[in-house]
Every structure is written in C-alpha cells, then in structure tokens.
Amino acid sequence: MKIGTWNVTTLKNDYRIDILTDEFRRFELDLLGVSETHIPGVGSMKLGDIEFVYSGRKDGVHRQGVGLMMNKEAAKSCLGWEGINNRILIAHFMTKKFRVSVIVVYAPIEPTDGDTSDSDEFYLQLQEQIDRVPGRNMVFLLGDFNAQVGRNRDRWYPSLGNFGVGKENSNGYRLLQFCRYNNLVITNTVFGHKMAHKLTWYSRDGKTANLIDYVIVNRRLAGSIQDTRVYRSAVIDVKSKDHHLVVSKVNLKLKFRKSNSLPGSYDVGRLQDENLRKKIPGTVEY
C-alpha cells in the first residue's frame, strides 16, 4: 500500500486537479493527503475511478484547505470522513489487520512576530482529533506541518529517527512535543536517503530547502512502514515547483465494505449535539 502527502499550492484551477489525478495514478498511490488546496467549503469529487474529499474555509475564500485522494479500493474501504476545518480533515478505513485513521493537515507557518495563537488553536484541534481515535487504530498524520524538526535524535527518540534534517525551529519543537506526547513517529526521519529524497520544500530561488511535509504514524504500528521518501519527478506546475511529493510504502491490505459508495461527511458542528451523535453510528468509535 502506498500513502503520500503533497502540498500542491492550489487546486483552484481544474487543470491542476487533472494533473494531480494523473500523478496520483502514475505513482500508483492508494491514499494522498493534499495540503493547501484553496478549495472552500466541505465536499467531495468523483474523478473517474478516484474519489477526492476536501475541507476548506467556510467564508468562500480560496486559501488554506486540505483534501484526501483515494483510489477505488481505498474508497471501498472507507468507513467515513469529516472535514473538521480549513486545516484538518480526518477519514477512517478498514484493513485486514486493523482500522486506520488518516488525518490530513495544513499547519500555520512559523510565526515571525512571536504570536503563536494560530498554532495554539491548530494543535488544540489536532489533539481533539487524536483523542477521538481508538487506541487500537493505526494513525497516519499527513501534511505540510511548516515545521523543521532537526536531527537531535538523542533528545526526541523515538519520535525522531536517525535521519533528521537541518535545525529545529519553534514549529518543529511544537511538532516534536506533540509527537512525543501522543507516541508518534516521524517516518521521514527513520529511513536513510540522499538529501534530494528527503527535502520536501525549496524556495523559489532554489537557495533554501527544508523538510516540512511529513508522514507520521503511531509508534506501536511504525513497523508497518517500509519506506518514506520524496519523489521529485512528481510535478503539477513547473513554475511553482516548491513542494515535493512524499510517499510511504506500508505493509497493509485494505478490506472492502459491502457498499461501493463513498460514505458522506458528517456535519461536525451538528455532532456537538449529544442526542444526534447517539443516532449516527460510527461518529464516536471507528
């Protein structure tokens, strides 16, 4: 099974969605977490044999946004999904071993003025989603965390592996604390690759490069990850080729539901109603 993450800068134009689906097929992906879609609202698209669900801003502004692309088999194993907000989307899947919860994120950028309010809110909301996932589930966090985690393995093991990159920044410190608290492993740092297959973001002038897009899993099941690396040949727009596709190979096999239709998204706001939650199966336990 192949699971990826990619900041695509924008999917506001239809041709970019077409190219993304072509690349999804070319790399034979099962699931792809997409950051910075710039698609407002919450909804889904059927793109031939591919399903794409997304969660964006409620005010109609084409900024931020996250999405999850699924091939036919992944869609058939999907138990349900929720667009939490313009930075977080969660979906749940059946496999032959256990259930999997996939959380796609687009984290706030590193603050330059010392104001961490956006990051504070983001990590509070992300923690809420982690807390909702049963402990027996395998968890994937996919996305652009805008965080540099560095290479201080002695301090952050087992969340950080032997192959970290660069220097830790404040967003990286925040992410590493989050991973340690939740027993998560940053798989990009577990496998040894040449730098071109580790760095996920490049500045427009090509002078600066960092690792900021991650595939993160819970420690108990980290042994299922066979590899995580960057694929630089994946391109949507050569003029804005700043983020690169990250792909993990996972030792998992999906298990199909009886229904072939993709489950719809629940209205998260309405799920605050305790009586409604009791009427909807699967909104608390997955």
Image (cartoon, helix red, strand yellow):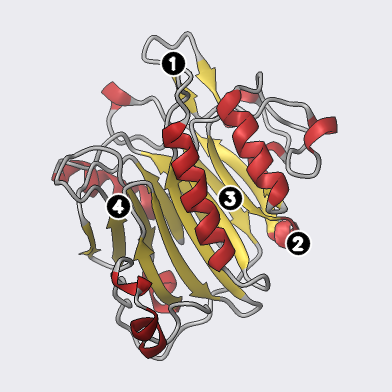
Q: Nearer the viewer, mark 1 or mark 2?
A: 1
What amino acid is found at the position of numbered circle 1 in the picture?
Asp
The relative height of residue 45 versus residue 110 in the rendered view (above or below) is below
| The quarter of the displayed image where residue 279 is located | bottom left
List the residue tagged with mark 3: 248
| Other residues around mark 2 within 10 Å, as few (<14) / some (14–19) / many (≥20) | some
Q: Amino acid at mark 3?
A: Ser
First reached walking from the N terminus: tag 2 or tag 3 = 2
Q: Which residue is mark 2?
A: 220
Query: Residue at position x 46%, y 46% from top?
Result: 5
Checking the image for residue 21, the label placed there is 4
Circle 4: residue type: Thr
Task: Tell me which label, 4 or 1, sits earlier in the chain.
Answer: 4
Left or right, residue 35 beside residue 264: right
Task: Select label 3 or label 1 by which is in front.
Answer: 1
Whole-Å distance between the Cαs marked 3 and 1? Answer: 35 Å
Q: Secondary structure at mark 1?
A: loop
What residue lies at 55% left-to-right and 41% top-to-bottom?
Answer: 214
Asked which quadrant contains residue 224, the reply is bottom right
Q: Are marks 3 and 4 in contact (CB under 8 Å)?
A: no
Instruction: Report whether residue 40 is seen.
Output: yes
Percent coordinates x, y for residue 168 in the rendering: 65, 23
